[in-house]
Image (tube, rainbow, N blue to C red):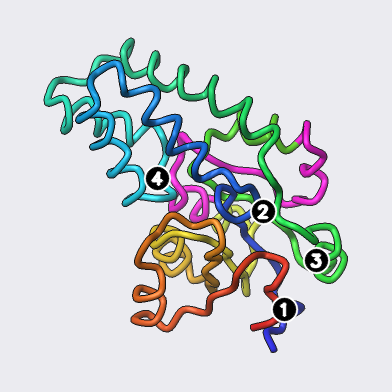
């Protein structure tokens, strides 16, 4: 049995872990990029899926510079990210939330809870507040434009995140960020878009769970 009570902190990714929102983000990238043609749009979707947990800002920069093959224009980049945000925010307010969060919060009352996401930080805080979830995450809700490595490093440096700590995520980037920061890691697979997660987790000896509410089954 996995002893959650040994952890001083639990870090959660958002998309695919707390919210069933991975497909929302995928559809948003496709819809926003479609004006450039179906082929570039699908190339962006492929890059997005292969790089779960990376911020939208980096993905749209890649889209402009590598897929479209031109210099990044700040005005165009801002237009793409704003259009993306407008679509995503509305969907995040109504997508499913993982079950049993409040019961798990009660079981881990001695741990600080954090959200560390590739999603936009202000957008996440607004959505979590409106959905009544913000109160559960006493450590705070963090996201882009800083990446997860930067966020975790800053929190460890200022002492807000203390070890031992556990990271619950659904992408290989989540695992790498947790490992780099010295956090234990569990892969949450129910809503993940990481198609080869089984092979990856087996190769790296990673514990896996269906959803957040089954973390006690490890």
* Precedes in sequence: disc 3 or disc 2: 3
User: Where does label 2 land, which residue?
Assistant: 114
Label 4 – label 1 distance at C-alpha: 28 Å
Label 4 – label 3 distance at C-alpha: 27 Å
* Precedes in sequence: disc 3 or disc 1: 3
Mark 1 closeness class: few <14, some 14–19, many ≥20 residues within 10 Å = few
Label 2 – label 4 distance at C-alpha: 18 Å
Coordinates of residue 37 in the picture (x, y in percent):
23, 21
Mark 4 closeness class: few <14, some 14–19, many ≥20 residues within 10 Å = many
Residue at image x 70%, y 29%? 126
Write down the region rendered in magenta: 129-154
Q: Quadrant of residue 99?
A: bottom right
* Precedes in sequence: disc 2 or disc 1: 2
Query: Closer to the camera: disc 2 or disc 4?
Result: 4
* Precedes in sequence: disc 2 or disc 4: 4
Query: Closer to the camera: disc 2 or disc 1?
Result: 1
Query: Closer to the camera: disc 4 or disc 1?
Result: 1
Secondary structure at numbered mark 3? helix
Residue 182 drawn in magenta:
no
In this rendering, the count of numbered labels is 4
Residue at image x 39%, y 64%? 176
Rendered position, 35 above or below 180:
above
Q: Quadrant of residue 77?
A: top left
User: Where does label 1 land, which residue?
Assistant: 216
Secondary structure at numbered mark 4? loop
Secondary structure at numbered mark 2? strand
User: Where does label 4 land, which residue?
Assistant: 54
User: Where does label 3 land, which residue?
Assistant: 104
Residue at image x 50%, y 60%? 170
């Amino acid at each position: 049995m996995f002893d959650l009570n040994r952890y001083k902190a639990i870090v959660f990714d958002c998309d695919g872990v707390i919210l069933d929102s991975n497909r929302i983000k995928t559809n948003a990238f496709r819809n926003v990029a479609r004006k450039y043609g179906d082929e570039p749009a699908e190339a962006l979707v492929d890059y997005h899926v292969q790089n779960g947990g990376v911020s939208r800002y980096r993905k749209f920069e890649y889209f402009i510079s590598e897929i479209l093959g031109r210099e990044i224009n700040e005005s165009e980049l801002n237009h793409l990210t704003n259009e993306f945000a407008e679509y995503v925010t509305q969907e995040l307010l109504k997508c499913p939330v993982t079950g049993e969060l409040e019961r798990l919060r009660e079981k881990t009352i001695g741990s600080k809870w954090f959200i560390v996401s590739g999603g936009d930080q202000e957008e996440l805080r607004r959505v979590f507040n409106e959905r009544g979830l913000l109160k559960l995450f006493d450590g705070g809700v963090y996201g882009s434009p800083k990446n997860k490595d930067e966020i975790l490093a800053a929190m460890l440096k200022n002492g807000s995140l203390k070890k031992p700590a556990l990271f619950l995520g659904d992408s290989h980037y989540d695992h790498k960020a947790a490992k780099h920061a010295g956090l234990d890691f569990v892969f949450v697979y129910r809503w993940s878009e990481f198609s080869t997660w089984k092979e990856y987790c087996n190769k790296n000896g990673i514990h896996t769970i269906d959803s957040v509410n089954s973390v006690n089954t490890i």
